[in-house]
Each structure stands twice: as structure tokens, then as C-alpha cells.
Amino acid sequence: MSITRTRILPAVGLAAVAVFALSACGSSDSLEGSGSNNGGNSGEKSSTIVVGSQDYYSNEIVAEIYAQALEKADFTVERNFAIGQRDAYVPSLEDGSVDLFPEYTGNLLQYFDKDAKATTPDDVYAELEKALPDNLKALDYSPATDQDSYNVTADFAKENNVSEIGDLAGISDLTLGGAPELEKRPYGPAGLKSVYGVDVKFEATANTTVDELVAGNIQVANVYSADPLIKTKDLVTLKDPKGLFLASNVVPIASSDVADEISDVINKVSAAMSPEELVAMNVESTVDQRSTEDIAKDWIADNLG
């Protein structure tokens, strides 16, 4: 997967989870009975929730999890998947033809505010809330991400005792690989030096970045954080405590008309989804060739009860 693909700690409110637990039928782990905001016990949904997705397998998996979680909570759901990229689906969100969509905080912030400077998860989310149109609302963002990240092999990490980007400082003869434009990006070689004191050479590797890393031709690779190759090639994603990269956490974007009604269900999904689980689900899709529906069903059974 090339870093040129266009396009992810949680701000989950404990009070929202508590309210959900009190309102759910049966155990606190159940999603049943959340599909009504009418104040009664009928469990009837107030509307059909249209869930959309990008034309991208990882995004569609998250959208299917949203859809199945809502159905488990007695909502009627319509799926409108594989719409395309932001220029195609954002108008559908804005005009109300799509009610809920899995997005990525940093990239969506840049779509609405090209001059945004925030990089850390909380700051990016706060700026995104301000930048969204009035008829859209960001629900709680997830720990799961799909964003630029720096990776090393597991052997390199062990041999050099590195787990964060800053741990690379002082290691000699490092070569960073990635798409050609990475060389001039603010989080490229210049950013590594200014933010973390890490000196690297640069090699344009494009679609062969991970292969070059595994072969030892480069020592650091720029890979999207949910790329299945991180798991299948036994890579280690280096932590970025200083916010070199623009945080792009998975975030549900909802129509303001339904946001309050579905927030208990969808925020619980966000809280439960980890970066490692998103990568694992992507592996199930691309390597194991499992269907999106089955991947989502199993994830809900394992994480939401």
C-alpha cells in the first residue's frame, strides 16, 4: 500500500457509557433496546439510518460494524457503501442522504480547513468539531487510526531498543523510505530532525516501501497505520508522542438529526476498536479473503457482546 493513497486518547465520555448501561435491556454489555429516543419502552426506531462508506475495504469494514451494531440495537439500517472519496460522499452527508459515515479526524479536518495546524489527537478532534458544518456532528473518536506512521522491522526494534520515533536519535546510517513526495513533507526528513533530532537519508520507494524495509535496504518506512502489511510482515510502528504526524483517528460523522439518537451505540463501537484490531480486520479482508459482513459480525461478538 503506498502512502500516496488519499484518505485515523479516545475522547469517549464515561457518562455516555453509564447512561447506555442503564438504558440497555438485559446486561450492560448488550446493545439491545437503544433504538428509540421517544422515552417509551417500545424499542421502535425513529427513522432509518443510512450508513455510508468510502470505496475502500478498511472503511467499509468499520461502516459495516456501525450498521450491524445499530441493527442489534433495533434500528432500521440502510447501507450505501463504496460511494467513493470525500468529494463524492461529503455532499451526501451535508444534504442528509447519508446519516452516518466512518471518517478520519486529521484528513477530514484538512478537507474543511486547509490551514489547520493541529496534529495531536485531541487537538485535531477539537478543531474538527469547529470546522464541521452545523448539520454534521463528530461522535467520539476511536483509538484506531489510519494515518502516516514510521515503522521498523521487529528485529531492528529489538536490536536497537526502539519503540518511539525519538529512540532513533543517535543511530547512524538510517535511511527513510516512502513515496517521493515524503522528502518534502513537514513530517519527512526535516521534521524528523527538527522534532525528534533524528538524522536520516531519504530514498523514494513508492509501492515497494515495505519490501525495501524487510530486505534491509532502508531502516525506516512510512506506512499507513492500518496497512495489513504491518501485521503480515511483522513490523513495529513507532510511537509519535510529539505529534509529528497529523493524527487521523477513526471518527463517526453523523447527521445532527440522528447524532444524539445513535451516539450511545456508535460511541461504544469507537471506544472498543483498537489500532491493532483495525489492522487485524484488514488482514482478514485482504489476506484471508473474509467477507466484510462476517468480519464485522465477529468483531461485534468479541467486543460488544
Image (spheres, rainbow, N blue to C red):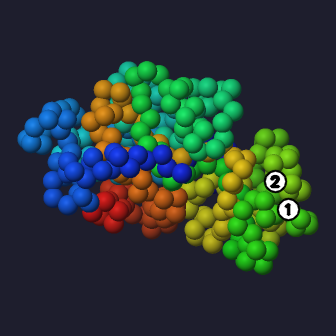
Dots 2, 1 in contact, CB < 8 A: yes
Q: Position of residue 304 (x, y in %)?
A: 31, 60
Whole-number angstrom distance, CA of label 2 to CA of label 1: 7 Å
- 93 vs 133, nearest the viewer: 133
Residue furthest to the right in view is: 172
Picture residue at 53% right of the left edge, 26% below the top: 130
Picture residue at 69% right of the left edge, 54% below the top: 241
Q: Secondary structure at mark 1?
A: loop
In the rendering, which numbered label is found on residue 200? Answer: none
Is residue 59 in view from this perspective? no
Lateral position of residue 218 relative to residue 101, left or right: right
- 260 vs 63, nearest the viewer: 260
In the rendering, which numbered label is found on residue 196? Answer: 2
Lateral position of residue 206 relative to residue 34, left or right: right
Q: Amino acid at mark 2?
A: Tyr
Q: Position of residue 73 (x, y in %)?
A: 21, 48
Q: Amino acid at mark 1?
A: Ala
Residue occupied by mark 1: 169
Q: Position of residue 135 (x, y in %)?
A: 40, 22
